[in-house]
Image: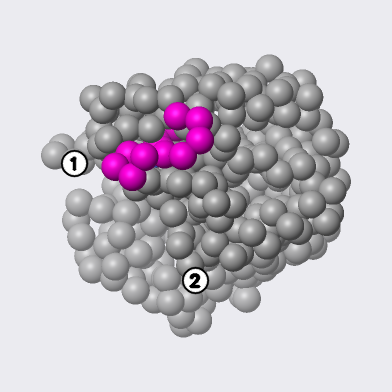
Amino acid sequence: MNCNKKTVKDVDVRGKRVLLRCDFNVPRDKETNVITDDKRIRAAIPTISYLLENGAAVVACSHLGRPKGEWVPELSLAPVAARLSELLGKPVKMAKDVVGPDAMALAAGLKSGEIMLLENLRYHKEETKNDPEFAKKLASMADIYVSDAFGTVHRAHASTAGVAQYLPAVSGFLVEKELRVIGGALNNPERPLVAILGGSKVGDKLGVINSLLDKADTLIIGGGMAYTFVKAMGGKIGTSLCEDDRLDYARDMIAKAKERGVRFLYSQDFIAAREFSPDAEPVVISGDIPDDMMGLDIGPATRKLFCDAIRDAGTVIWNGPMGVFEFDAFAHGTEAVARAMAECKGITIIGGGDSAAAVEKFGLSDKMTHVSTGGGASLEFIEGLELPGVACLLDK
Ligand code: ADP
Ligand code: MG
């Protein structure tokens, strides 16, 4: 996929109406519905400010939660408009609908330097279905489309891809950075390139290994991912996570790595427990895991093996925690990898929502070159799949 896409700086936005796809899918308190973390709103400010300062009128849009085509009042974007307005220090006009008469009228009256926000895109089921009529209505409110929601670029939805059929489409600064940093790491990396996979979405992530074997110098597998490999190579894993129908695949990947001269490292020892609980007693195990135990973190020898490989890397891409880092007793592996990355002088990239949360928890986010804002999107990007929300943007 070509990552060299036009950005807001490559088009003249003065006097134009811009449809800006943001990621305002913010976490909210379950009881009060108050926004608990406004990081995603703050992250959108550079692109919004650039557009407003350069004389554009901004029609911002986003989804929030999963209303699935129903008009769920708790999932209104009105609180986001209020917070955005505070952060920008100027009014943000909140539309009462998405492509209805209120939104259309507000957009038509919007002047240069003004901003409005449409209601939750997913109030219409046409959004996720990429319905052309819905996309056309969205596009009719603007002259230019700007994509700045990297978290949804792997989806072909009306607001992420469909609208580009009707408008010149470019990236905002958030998407531009994701494409530059992750695209650069994959297509033209500083070597050695070390890729680390972990976490619990094992089935989703096994496919990535195949494409990483064509790119990486070292491939590290930890977390819940590793047990499929341990078992495939004859080890006993107790009740640990495992994809039993992918054991052959795991063996193939190990053989392919050898063929290609890729260093393939996976967990050699473990921290296991009898139950999945924060209070479970952690037991260090090298060798077979007993039948009634599950591996919940990498062991000390594996920690050293992984961290030594990471420290000398030219580029590191990490997706998926090394253990159940939410439980302190099983967070050591994840913390060690995060610290080794923080010490690494090369380019360091975090993809994956939980990996980003782990790095944040250890206070190391600022020490990384890039923490991706899109979990699923960054994974599909690394896998080498075409991202519909990127492919639809104008080439440079
Ligand atoms: P990401 O969001 O970074 O892509 P995933 O969603 O795939 O990562 O996985 C994150 C989850 O994996 C975390 O909640 C963590 O507790 C869990 N995890 C990591 N290692 C293990 C393990 N050995 N057993 C069970 N769960 C694990
Ligand atoms: Mg996750």
Residue 97 in view, yes or no:
no
Q: Residues within 10 Å of mark 1 (few under 14, many from 20)?
A: few
Observer-nearest of 343 and 123: 343
Kindly report the distance in space between the C-alpha atoms of the residues bearing marks 2 and 1.
28 Å
Check disc 1 and report the residue beneath it: 30
**Range of the magenta residues?**
285-297
Amino acid type for the residue under numbered disc 2: Ala
Q: Is residue 124 above or below residue 260?
A: below
Q: Residue at x 79, y 52 (%)?
A: 258
Residue 126 part of the magenta segment:
no
Q: Quadrant of residue 197?
A: top right
Any magenta on residue 291? yes
Disc 2 marks which residue? 158
Residue 123 lies left or right of residue 51; in this view the side is: left
Q: Is residue 208 above or below residue 347?
A: below
Coordinates of residue 325 in the picture (x, y in percent): 41, 30
Give the secondary structure at mark 2. loop
